[in-house]
Amino acid sequence: MTSCYRLHYAPDNASLIIRLALEELGLRYKTVLVDRSISEQRSDAYRALNPNGLIPVLETTEGPIFETAAILLWLSDRHQALAPDVGSKQRGDFLKWMFFTSNTLHADLRMLFYPETYIGPDATQQKALRKTLRQRLHRHLTNVEAAAAQRPDWLGAKEPSVLDLYLACQLRWMALYPAGCDRSWFVLAQYPHLYSLCAELELRASVTVARTAEGLGATPFTSPTPATPPEGSAT
């Protein structure tokens, strides 16, 4: 593909995962800032691209694509990299963990970050929900850690996969968000294979580009600090 992709992004949002994939694939792309400080993701113009009003959207020659996992799989299949081939014996195992990361891990993170959206304004109920979600997330990470310990080619290997990129960003967010809440429940070092995955990614040129563009700091995954982006808002 010689034409340029357009990534609608906000700093340190799920669009970060797509930026990393585009960089790893060596593709040309332009970024379009979605200003969360004025809820631009809810504007009519943005909803024309993603009616759900969520970030990211990737504009392609085949039209706009939304949902993080859908974009990642579309890119990896289109460019035949960052994931096992469709006919590979590893494809099934890769897909089950990819969809687990998207449908379960990411979904639980959204509830942890925005409990009011799911349970209403009652602070006591929100606290109880967050406690349950932290327990669930620990179980999820324990299971992913066990999968990584098997050393498959698509999880924590020498060359990253889209699943690696997805997980590393989620691990970053667990350490940082929600701001003002207890985050001591999450210690990345408790999951040594996931820690190694993050440490290896931090050495890659794709991460250097992303952390510079979005103000992510020197160690965005292993010891993250809140984003200080040159433009836009992470929240």
Image (cartoon, helix red, strand yellow):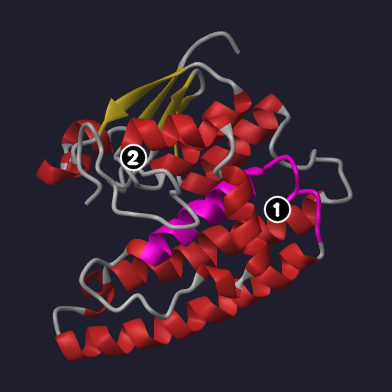
Q: Position of residue 130 (x, y in %)?
A: 33, 82
Would you say 60 lies left or right of 129 here? right
Residue at 81 percent across and 55 percent down: it is 152
Residue at 19 percent across and 91 percent down: it is 124
Quarter placement of the N terminus: top right
Check disc 2: other Cα within 10 Å, few if <14, some if 14-19, many if 20+. Answer: many
Q: Residue furthest front?
A: 218
Would you say 142 lies left or right of 56 here? right
Q: Position of residue 193 (x, y in %)?
A: 68, 64
- Mark 2: which amino acid? Asn
Residue that label 2 marks: 50
The total number of labels drawn is 2
- Pointer 2 with pointer 1, Cβ within 8 A: no
177 above or below 1?
below
The foreground one among 2 and 174 is 174
Residue at 63 percent across and 47 percent down: it is 200
- Mark 1: which amino acid? Gly
Residue at 43 percent across and 49 percent down: it is 220
Q: Residue furthest right?
A: 89
Q: Is residue 104 magenta?
A: no
140 above or below 210?
below
Q: Which quarter of the figure has residue 79?
A: top right
- Magenta residues, as a range? 151-175
149 above or below 13?
below
Q: Position of residue 111 (x, y in %)?
A: 35, 71
The foreground one among 232 and 77 is 232
Q: Position of residue 142 (x, y in %)?
A: 63, 76
Which of the numbered marks, if any, corresponds to residue 156?
Answer: 1
Indicate the secondary structure of the residue bearing disc 2: loop
Would you say 128 lies left or right of 15 here? left
137 above or below 77?
below
Q: Is residue 166 magenta?
A: yes
